[in-house]
Image (cartoon, rainbow, N blue to C red):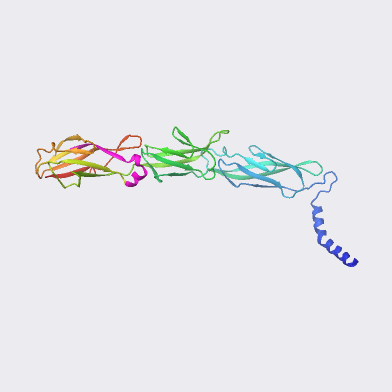
Amino acid sequence: MGGVKELRYYVMLALYFPILLYAFSTFDLDESTYAVSGLEPVVVGDQVVVLGQPFNARAFLAVAGGQGQELQGDGSLASVGDTLFQMQTGSLLNQKESEKVVPYSGTFKFEQVGGNVSELPVEGAFRVKRPEIVASSEAMLALYRQSRNPVRIDVPGLEDRELELVVGNSKVKGRSTMLSPSGNEVKVNVYLVDAENGNVFLGSKSFAVIDPPRPEISVTNAGREIKSGDNLPKRRAVLEFNVNPDQEFKRRYPQDARYRVRKATIYLRKGLTASKKIGTYDLDGEKLVLTRVLREAQPGDRVMVELDGVQRINYQGAAISVPLSESSRTFGFVIS
């Protein structure tokens, strides 16, 4: 049995002796220190940071051997606890910059076995970039002029942070606003709310502005729809004009899809003579009464009605002129 034990001893020595030699070779055996030497700290941090998000990096030794470690950052790099570096990114880009590489540096301190404190430098870099501004609205591709356009702004990566939306002199905190532009383009500036350091400009979102879809006008006489070229009874010469909005626009923007007609100009052509202007008349609601106007007309004469002052009433109650082509607002009938 003694021979077996001795054999086991030599086998164990052969296996572990190289490992022990390597371990001792990595230690400074000076009597004054007895500490790990030749080590560098490992820093693991974000590679890309969205503007407004804090940059985070953790620092630690590759091999344990010290204790009482402490971090110290340079400049705007702050230390949080004994392993975390952090830097606020809100001021790292000016309004003309979209992204850039930001270097950082600091010091990793730790207490050696003998009580001495060693300092190891740490450094690195990360890229900060402006976030994507994602906008959604009912019209999607553009906003309708002088209409109530609800718009929502989202910023991926900053979903839990408060935003401020600025359009001209108007400021709204949150992610939703209402736009009613009158020009050809409107721009929304997006800021990250930061009460301590001042709001951070994240970017802008521009929208094209277009007119709402043109309505179509239909005409009825005594409840019957008539078209240009149809007969108009002289004794019942009452026309009712119906301005029909685009159905999709009406569904999405019901408060902005109301129309009215204010006036109409009447022309009369008797026989083969040229058309003669009779006058311009106000509509009673949507109705135009021509009984007295056509009292001198004869069967076969032609009357032409040209609508003036077609207006859209928007959500604020404002009357907005609707530019229609002459052919779409002019109707001609034969007196019967």
Quadrant that contains the C terminus: top left
In the image, farthest residue toward the right: 2
Where are the magenta residues, as a range? Answer: 247-265
- For the residue pair 196 and 253, the one nearer the viewer reads as 253
Residue 270 horizontal/vertical position (percent) = 10, 41
Residue 11 image position (x, y, % from top left) = 84, 64
Residue 252 percent across, percent down from the top left: 37, 44
Q: Residue at x 81, y 62 (%)?
A: 15
Q: Quadrant of residue 188?
A: top left
The residue under the point 76% across, 44% down is: 67
Magenta-drawn stretch contains 296? no
Question: Dividing the picture into quarters, in which one does residue 272 lie?
Answer: top left
Quarter holding the N terminus is bottom right
| Horizontal side of residue 313 vs 170, given as left or right | left
Q: Is residue 177 left or right of residue 16?
A: left
Total count of labels: 0
Q: Is residue 262 magenta?
A: yes
Residue drawn at x 49%, y 40% is: 203
Residue placed furthest toward the front: 223
Comparing 181 with 108, the one in front is 181
**x then y, percent, for residue 316:** 35, 35
